[in-house]
Image (cartoon, rainbow, N blue to C red):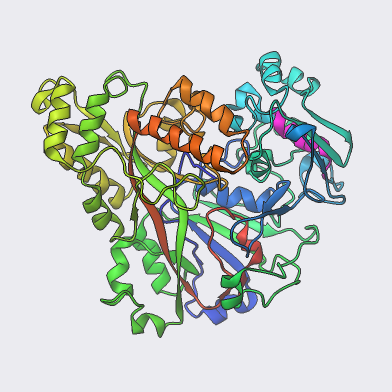
Amino acid sequence: MKKIVVLNLCLVFALFLGCTKKDEINKDNKILNVALTSEISTLDPVNSYDNVSGMIIYNICEQLYDYHYLNRPYELKPLLADGMPLIENKGQRYVIKIKKNIRYHDHPAFKGQPRFVKAQDFINQFKRLSYTPLNSTGWWVVDGVVKGVNDFKKTVGSDFGKFKSTSISGVSAPDDYTLVIELLQPSPQFIYKLSMSFVSPVPMEVIEYDKNDLSKNPVGTGPFFLGQSKNIAKEINLTKFVNYHESFYPSEGDRFANSRGLLKDSGEKIPFIEGIHFVVVTDNKSRWDLFNQNKLDFIVLPQEFYNQVFDDVGNLREEVKAKNIRLQTMPTLTYWWLAFNMKDPLLGKNLNLRKAIAHAVDMDKYIQLFTNNTGQRANSILPPGILGYDPSATLPYEYNLEKARDFLAKAGYPGGKNLPELVYDTRAESKISNDQAEYFKSQLALIGIKVKIVNNNFKAYLEKSRTGHLQFFQDGWTLDYPDAENIFQLLISVNHPPGPNASFYNRPELDGMYDKLSKLPDGEEKKALIVKMEKMVNDDIPWIMQYYSRNFILYHDYVKNYRPSDLIWSYPKYLRVK
């Protein structure tokens, strides 16, 4: 999804109810309450690019396609589309049929009448992605990809009247249930983007009624709609949509799904639960305490509590099992690095300084301290499982203080003398985030580099990322789709903030390679190009790679059908709580 420019390492799902016996809690109240680890940044799908907002939006809004819940490797299936697209003109034209009788949630703009999805609603969202005042983080999805969006952006500017009256030449609706999208060039990965929240349909009457600001009041076709909330910054309530279109629990799955008994509800109409209560709980201890009080459904286990859960050989302790607590270990599509702002006049222009920093941080010790050795040391800017990833690859830096000091001298700052203090921004208000910052500060101090730590909550961090006000920081990524294109788009110049290139990396040669990569199907030619692109990035060191994440998820056994995933954010519709 996500960036994410942005990610939450410990996204947890909590049941915030006062009772302590779960059979009593769920007998009459089938509400799933979800604890979010930071404040909500936006509810507008045109700007949702972090896991926190994505958890909410993907349960309200739907897209043309989504991922099969129980099959791995991941495979797309139709959601609002009535079948897979007809791809014509050598891969440059997508013809997509839209399902009929897909009803939106109620909204004042509909004046009490049911409103059903039409192809034009998708065109409206393509316009919103391209509308300058919205400053969309999803602009990269269409920029230079879909025919006519750049002309639309230039012609319309900030004029809402022109926004409504101006068409996009490459996106059309021959009838209410046919959407045609024309690309400037073939893009085998484009279909993945049609599963992202950025392309959720929006009726024009909603856009007009809410003055094109859906940040607090999105409307969609999903299994849940936005209910009343006392304080949207602290909690969000979603309610089951009784007019949700017919959708059913999958009737097939992979080996894991069969072995875990995840097919017992095959063919049953979803959703099963009555609603979701999202609440912001920012610290690990509060979530952990709630889980142990039987007030949480499940939790991605924070590192500081591993010793309370696992015995000396890594198995669940007997006292944990006795509470009917279960464990799932999940390899993720999330990984982390330290990032430099390449536009910064100090760090961005001094390769030897970046090399010095890269050689000064002991990542093995970091992984031990902050992941309890559950993180896998990154050896590539690509994660495992992606075409082009090489398990034998090595990075052009290592923990070596002698080399770090040599590079620092070459950078013009022997012993750190006369080097201005670097600024490191945290990404969350938490003890672990502050401890990580102090670790990096202490590591660089060993070669004479001084670091000032600036503490941010996640919302403030996102805003600084979107506006380019970061110098040295931790960044991470959860793949939106399983392809190297989704990684390299973090490094191309057209995606500078508010796009996902938070490092402001800029290499025209890489931009040209990326353009070629986006047209290639999987194969040896594509793989060779990926290797060449990665070498270019590694030579420049805009990132210092850290680790690939792996999550340990604890849950009570009354939670049924749960299968964790980095790509499937609408999973609550498949869950039972009983």
* Figure check: 158 above or below 327: above
Residue 89 drawn in magenta: no
Q: Is residue 173 above or below residue 27?
A: above
Task: Please determine whether, in this image, residue 29 is positioned above or below residue 345.
Answer: below
Q: Residue at x 84, y 46 (%)?
A: 116
- In this rendering, would 136 be left or right of 292? right
Position of residue 521 measured from the top left corner of the image (x, y, whole percent): 63, 40
Horizontal side of residue 101 vs 304, given as left or right: right
Question: From where the camera sits, is residue 424 visible?
Answer: yes
- Residue farthest to the top, as pictured: 155
Check if residue 121 falls in the magenta segment.
Answer: yes
Q: How many numbered marks have been drawn onto this rendered protein structure?
A: 0
Q: Position of residue 229 (x, y in %)?
A: 59, 51
- Is residue 136 at least partly visible in the picture? no
The residue at the point 31 percent across, 68 percent down is 306
Residue 359 screen position, x and y as percent: 21, 38
Segment tinted magenta in the rendering = 117-127
Q: Residue at x 49, y 33 (%)?
A: 500
Q: Residue furthest right?
A: 175
Q: Main secondary structure of the magenta part?
A: helix
From the top left corner, tell me how far across and down residue 242 is, in percent. Answer: 77, 61
Splitting the image into 4 quarters, where does residue 89 fall? top right
